[in-house]
Image: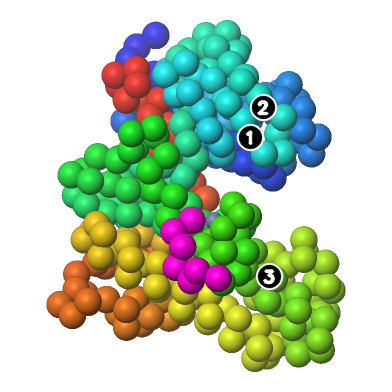
Amino acid sequence: MAKDDRVFVGVDLGATKIMAAAYDAKMRPISTEKMKTPREANAKKVVGALSEAVRLCLEAAGPGLALGGVGVAVPGPLDRAKGIVRYTPNMGFKDYNLGQELENLFGAPAYLDNDVQAGAYGELRAGVLRGKTNAVAVFLGTGIGGGIVIDGKLFRGSSGSAGEVGHMIIHEGGSLCGCGNYGCLEALASRTAMAKDAVALAASGKAPGMLDAAGTDIRKYRSSAFEASLGAGDKYIKKAVDRAAFWLGVGLANIVHILNPEAIVLGGGVVSRFGEKFRDKAVESMNDHLMPGLAGTAEILLSELGDLAVPTGAAFFAAEGVGA
Ligand SMILES: [Zn+2]
């Protein structure tokens, strides 16, 4: 196999969907594949779907190409060096040697990584953070995660978990977070946080558009339901979304104070739906909370890669892991 005939596949292994993307030896995107994650918490079935996504992606990439390496981004603690997934919520992995299994399946090196750090790395290598030296990526969805770039490199921290910006406590005594603390950024600015407010508004008759779009089942409060509700003129829902942007701005101010980055990229489902307006509200709040002299030091950018940020980063980890 010639060196240039290699393909690197990066996979975002999420609890609801699996997203794979293939890149050529020069790391240009060639093909993508998306599928639903099996609903049962069964690691074997999840690995089956994951390897199917890699295969389909390779097939779509075209004939005469061989897999040079696969990178998989996982939402949970792992041992990167050994390729072991310690635990994942909802997918049934427990001390699972996914790296070895994928190497056996594909006959190519496999690399595991944390999903949010892979997303930050994708933005750094091929997205809106290209060429930046000090930067932060903040991904907003059902939760909030982050990745930190220092001196042009991903900063992982001493045990690999740097960048948990969603769990900085910014309003002690505020809303309860999934982690058990009160007032984390995630409990105030994630889609889950907005959904908690929105379901209360719908139940009390203050958000008829939302009630029509999603009822009162919080699991249906996806970004599309928010869009429908805002489109129907639900002003209290707008207030709830603006409030999330306000708290995000407080979080961004904290990040700027601590790290003095040149840029912060916002990504994830919430941002791809609410876009610039949401960003602008957050920037307004950030500026209100920054020390004098720091306003304007960090550019607040929107992700260019969208849901390809994570697979892109995972593919780069794989390519660099094998020395491409
Ligand atoms: Zn928390």
User: Is the distance from the Cβ of mark 2 to the nearest ligand 1 atom less than 8 Å?
Assistant: no
Residue at x 53%, y 80% (from the top left corner): 243
User: Is the distance from the Cβ of mark 1 to the nearest ligand 1 atom less than 8 Å?
Assistant: no
The residue that label 2 is drawn on is: 93
Q: Main structural element of the magenta stretch: helix, strand or loop?
A: loop
Image quadrant where one finds the C terminus: top left
Magenta stretch in the rendered image: 167-173
Q: Are marks 2 and 1 in contact (CB under 8 Å)?
A: yes
Colour pattern: rainbow
Residue at x 76%, y 75% (from the top left corner): 199
Mark 3 vs mark 1: which is more N-terminal?
A: 1
Return the residue nearer the eye: 280 or 6: 280
Q: Looking at the image, is 25 positioned above or below residue 187?
A: above
Q: Looking at the image, is 53 positioned above or below residue 185?
A: above
Q: Can residue 139 be seen by looking at this rendering?
A: no
Q: In which quarter of the image is residue 102?
A: top right
Outermost front residue: 173
Percent position of residue 112, x then y: 48, 26
The residue that label 1 is drawn on is: 88
Image quadrant where one finds the N terminus: top left
User: Where residue 195 is drawn, which disc sits there?
Assistant: 3
Q: What residue type is labelled 2?
A: Phe
Percent position of residue 117, x then y: 41, 42
